[in-house]
Amino acid sequence: TPSEEVALVDAVVVGAGFAGLYMLHRLRQQGLTATVLERGSGVGGTWFWNRYPGARCDVESLEYSYKFDEALQSEWAWSERYATQPEILRYIEHVVERFDLRRNIRFDSNVISADYSARSRRWNITIEGGKRYEARYFIAATGCLSQPNEPKYPGQESFGGDIHYTSRWPQQGVDFTGKRVAVIGTGSSGIQSIPLIAAQAAHLTVFQRTPNFSVPACNRPLQPDEVAKTKIEYGRFREHNLEQPFAFNLFVNPRNLADASPAEREREFERRWSAFGGLQFLGAFQDVFTDPTANRAAQEFIRGKIRSIVQDPRKAELLMPSDHAVGCKRLCSDSGYFETYNRPNVDLVDIRAEPIESFVQNGVRVAGRVVEVDAIVYATGFDAMTGALSRIRIQGREGRRLTDEWAQGAQTYLGLMSAGFPNFFMVTGPGSPSVLTNMVMAIEDHVDWISNCIAFLDAEGIHTIETPGERQNEWMRDVSAIAEATQFSGCNSWYYGSNIPGKPRVFTIYVGFADYRKKIGQIAARQYDSFTLERETAVA
Ligand code: NA7
């Protein structure tokens, strides 16, 4: 109704995770008014929702944290090499208090639509319940892995026990003591939670569709001397991160696998497995990710490990990936994952051989038999990259809908803007390096770029920025071409949207953070000349 109050701000930011929080801070610092709309009841985004047992980051805590404030980064003390979800959430909450961010965040606010008006040059944003906002800038900080994939099985309502999702775990936690539990899904979330659920529950049955490569995280408490060594030159350490292809210190052995003797190969893989851990495995030889032969050696090494750890040969066989390269799907970092299958209370069901037919009152029916359980845990991942954005009805110029424009795959220029949607920015949007980086570095870089851009526009009296369609086409062609030259193109993964039935198979991640960063930096230095900029025409 016309009398309904509309809040007027310079910018509306959607999402109060790492991206939205820093975006708010930067906008306020430059004297703008901003509101963050967050569908959760607290801050943290990914780290607010994914509270499942064992949830932790696969990038080291000294790297996976904000660098924008010297005092913040030198004072905050991480306890472990890889921080757990509760510790990361505490850190985010600390940042919110320290920079007094909470007063501009509205919680429990699910944004349902955003419409651009060319007449007023404003975005009209509506949240569930009807509250409306008008803003010059509309900024999506909605995350790349924030819209859960929740496959439905026949008979789901008839299941008598509890159903949980790793992607929206209850705040008060879940007690599985004495319970028979099913976990569906063996990606990072499954692989991290399975060991802890198995240790607590009476019995655990894992329903696996595709076995995954996983390497021990080699997590441990951080030692005061190593922390001090990093912090004494934290600025240089961060600069070095920004020059890396994935924005974290991946120690890449400069040798090719073919140049190493069999003994050297074994030694290097073993060192990566038992001392470096996790994603560092990918750096064993510089060609692991580009040469199929080198990659096969890495696959064989991990399969050998699974064979030697898992005592039951049937389970070991099922747990060995055979249809994809190492790194083609996100390499998992675990703490005792394969060992868990040696517990007498853990079973494994291969749902390719025995598909889930339905849920029944007392369990899960597969291939004509019922696996009796008291609780079911979905660890089935996300509608990645575009999922959260496509749930908002975003309408740009002439009523163009973002979901229509992206029907054949996301279309952006630099992963920052999309043609037809003026003054709409995305933080780590599709077409940027996003999930193939240390996310916090990628986020800070984008937020700095967007806020500098807005400062420039305001200073120059430019009211509208938009990307030309042809720039966008060229950009997305480049993004695909770069990916085609890597192992990523060789398998079905959520990077390609393959986990979501009907989603077009498009790679929307720019491989190579440092190159990307240089490119967007040059565009900013050239005063955004590859965009269309409109200013007020002077009246004589
Ligand atoms: P992932 O990595 O997408 O894993 C989801 C798992 O669930 C994976 O094993 C899937 O098998 C399985 N899945 C997905 N849909 C189904 C259906 N319909 N039936 C059975 N099994 C299914 O998500 P995560 O949450 O573990 O991790 C996401 C990222 O977060 C991770 O890579 C890190 O970057 C952080 P599939 O392999 O598709 O056959």
Image (cartoon, helix red, strand yellow):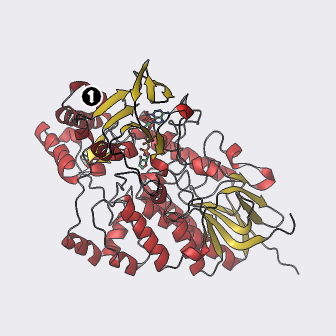
* Count of numbered circles on the image: 1
In the picture, the quarter occupied by the N terminus is bottom right
Task: Name the one closer to the observer, 271 or 319.
Answer: 319
Per the image, the residue denoted by label 1 is: 315
Residue 458 image position (x, y, % from top left): 68, 76
Which residue lies at the image location 32% right of the left edge and 70% below the top edge? 237
Where on the picture, by quarter, is residue 453? Answer: bottom right
Task: Name the one closer to the observer, 77 or 473.
Answer: 77
* Location of residue 275 with respect to 16 vertically, above or below: above
Where on the picture, by quarter, is residue 413? Answer: bottom right
Mark 1 and ligand 1: say if the CB distance to the nearest ligand atom is below 8 Å.
no
Q: Is residue 522 visible?
A: no
Q: What type is the residue that disc 1 sits on?
A: Lys
Q: Is residue 405 visible?
A: yes
Task: Tell me: 47 left or right of 313.
Answer: right
- Ligand 1's quadrant is top left
